């Protein structure tokens, strides 16, 4: 849906409280001419805020999110070598909820964007906890698949204290196979009227291909972010229909099998992916900043003061900002800055 003007928002809000109002009454209410009222109604219809002259409102889901939810178990140790050489080491252990599905959905919901989440969880006590968290955030969880066959996904990371770089990570994400291409095909109606969709790189390649096929046939902005596992992206046949790929330079090198170092290397990697059908590419590099590649132009956004571009959750925050901007009519540069401001608040 195109971005509404302030006056259009006022008129839409009034129509929602009084859907039987005539154009003459609307003109009187807003102290405008009848012809001006008619133009505003026409614009609201054109922008699909209302779906007909009976003022049927388009209260659709703005964003459909297909992504992982997992229990993030974070181990911190003093000596990384001990993790490999010793049978047991002293350290600290923390647990919180993570995953692109959860984090992007929560960020968009906080920005008042209607979100529908398609993911998978086990039938266990852990899943009840995170479902409650999502529902309190106002996220539609009706289509989260719960199964006895797989436990709620987990990621275990061990790192040196005060460092983001992992010594070792263990991903238990087998349950994501339940978000299959067949399931997406069965739920294709969920994309009806949606303004955007997000798909995680952790999902099966067949699921990603199915989402690309759906996006090609609709006016739907499709986003893919490279998260903890990019192997499925290597198996995607074509990225035609993908509006945005958000990826860090390390995973871009892995995906393209190219040396991606410095601004020139990032540019080569981005050009490679654009040749495969990606319309816009956002690359995060811990040293160089954030690069936006679109149409025949590119922009580099340097790190903001205090930003740590290795922070966990950075890709998710940036992706949420890009999605929010896209559905509200902002430019890619403006949208990226929304995400960059959110990144500045992440933990160091």
Image: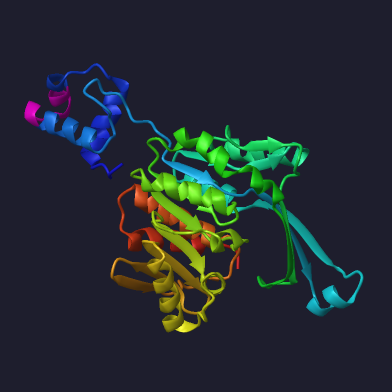
Residue 348 lies left or right of residue 43; in this view the side is right
Q: Is residue 29 magenta?
A: yes
Q: Quadrant of residue 117?
A: top right
Residue 28 coordinates in the image, percent (x, y): 13, 23
Q: Quarter of the image holding residue 243?
A: bottom left
**Percent of width and height locating residue 3:** 28, 45
Q: Residue at 34% of width from left, 30% of height from top?
A: 58
Is residue 122 shown to the viewer in this render?
Answer: yes
- What colouring method underlies this structural image? rainbow
Position of residue 293 in the picture relative to residue 22 (left or right): right
| Residue furthest to the right | 87
**11 part of magenta stretch:** no
Please, is residue 56 above or below residue 116 in the view? above
- Residue in view at x 49 percent, y 47 percent: 210
Q: Residue 136: x, y in percent?
A: 59, 36
Range shown magenta: 26-35
Q: Position of residue 162 (x, y in %)?
A: 69, 72
Q: Is residue 329 left or right of residue 120?
A: left
**Placement of the C terminus among the 4 image quadrants:** bottom right
Q: Residue at x 54, y 46 (%)?
A: 66
Which one is in front, 239 or 159?
239
- Quarter of the image where the N terminus is located: top left
Q: Is residue 25 above or below residue 287?
A: above
Task: State whether the magenta stretch is mostly helix, strand or loop.
Answer: helix
* Depth order, front residue of 47/294: 294
């Amino acid at each position: 849906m195109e971005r509404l003007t302030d006056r259009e928002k006022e008129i839409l809000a009034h129509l929602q409280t009084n859907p039987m109002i005539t154009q003459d009454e609307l003109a009187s209410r807003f102290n405008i001419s009848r012809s001006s009222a008619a133009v505003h109604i026409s614009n609201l219809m054109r922008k699909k805020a209302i779906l007909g002259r009976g003022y049927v409102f388009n209260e659709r889901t703005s964003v459909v999110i297909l992504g992982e939810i997992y229990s993030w178990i974070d181990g911190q140790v003093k000596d990384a070598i001990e993790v490999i050489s010793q049978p047991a080491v002293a350290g600290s252990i923390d647990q919180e909820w993570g995953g692109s599905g959860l984090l992007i959905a929560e960020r968009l919901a906080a920005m008042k964007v209607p979100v529908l989440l398609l993911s998978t969880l086990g039938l266990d006590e852990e899943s009840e906890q995170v479902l409650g968290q999502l529902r309190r955030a106002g996220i539609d969880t009706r289509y989260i698949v719960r199964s006895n066959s797989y436990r709620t996904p987990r990621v275990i990371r061990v790192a040196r204290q005060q460092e983001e770089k992992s010594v070792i990570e263990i991903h238990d994400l087998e349950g994501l196979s339940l978000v299959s291409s067949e399931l997406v095909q069965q739920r294709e109606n969920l994309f009806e009227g949606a303004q955007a969709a997000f798909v995680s790189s952790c999902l099966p390649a067949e699921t990603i291909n199915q989402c690309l096929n759906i996006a090609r046939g609709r006016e739907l902005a499709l986003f893919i972010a490279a998260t903890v596992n990019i192997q499925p992206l290597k198996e995607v046949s074509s990225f035609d229909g993908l509006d945005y790929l958000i990826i860090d330079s390390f995973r871009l090198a892995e995906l393209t099998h190219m040396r991606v170092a410095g601004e020139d290397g990032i540019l080569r990697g981005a050009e490679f992916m654009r040749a495969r059908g990606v319309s816009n590419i956002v690359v995060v590099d811990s040293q160089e900043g954030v690069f936006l590649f679109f149409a025949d132009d590119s922009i580099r956004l340097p790190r903001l003061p205090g930003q740590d571009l290795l922070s966990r959750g950075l890709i998710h925050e940036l992706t949420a900002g890009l999605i929010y901007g896209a559905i509200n009519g902002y430019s890619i540069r403006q949208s990226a800055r929304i995400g960059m401001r959110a990144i500045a608040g992440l933990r160091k």
